[in-house]
Image (spheres, rainbow, N blue to C red):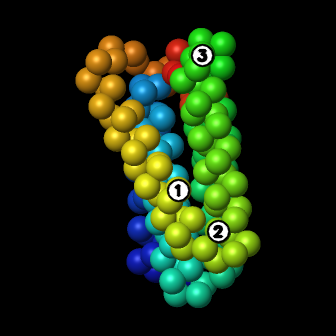
Amino acid sequence: MYGPNSAISSYSNTAMETSVHAANPHRLILLLFEGAILTVSSAIGHLSRNEVAQKGRMISHSIAIIDRGLSASLDMNAGGEIAQNLSSLYDYMVRRLLHASLNNDAEALKEVLRLLGELKGAWEAIADNTPEIPAKIEAPIERRASLSYGKV
């Protein structure tokens, strides 16, 4: 019932929750990129091992992170053309993930992984120029990724 995997999973969940609670809005977006990269990478591994159900779960989770996390964090009014372009790119990645899921297309997964890596790198690069804004610790996790001062 309880094994090493259960302990590792529990630690990982606690570590992630602690990271989210302590993160500023900029860091929350980085956490979303990291989560999406991790789940797409995992989907590639499951696909290579012909683990169809696990591949599907990881792709679904990736889509949720991109759609309900990254895309939902965009402020289309304040973000202007950049927000519009990111929205289009996120939509494209979701379509590629759906294609990969339906067609067992590892290349489509690798393409999304590459795009996520490039966006994460760009987001990290602007971190040096972003003032530290403390996150509201009392805000629920679900709301914190979409706080207005954390929108792009």
Residue 32 x %, y %: 50, 43
Q: What kind of residue is marked 2?
A: Ala
SS category of the residue bearing label 3: helix
According to the image, label 3 marks what residue?
Answer: 80
Residue at 47%, 50% (x, y): give it.
115
Q: What kind of residue is marked 3?
A: Gly
Residue 68 x %, y %: 67, 41
The answer to which of marks 3 and 1 sits earlier in the sequence is: 3
Check whether the beta carbons of the residues at disc 3 and disc 1 lie within 8 A of each other: no
SS category of the residue bearing label 2: helix
Using the numbered discs, state the Cα–Cα distance from disc 3 to disc 2 in whole angstroms: 30 Å
Residue 100's disc is 2
Left or right side of 92 for 17:
left
According to the image, label 1 marks what residue?
Answer: 112
Check whether the beta carbons of the residues at disc 2 and disc 1 lie within 8 A of each other: yes
Label 2 packing within 10 angstroms: few (<14), some (14-19), many (20+): many
* Observer able to see residue 4: yes
Q: Nearer the viewer, residue 26 or 14?
A: 26
Residue at 36%, 35% (x, y): give it.
122
The answer to which of marks 3 and 2 sits earlier in the sequence is: 3
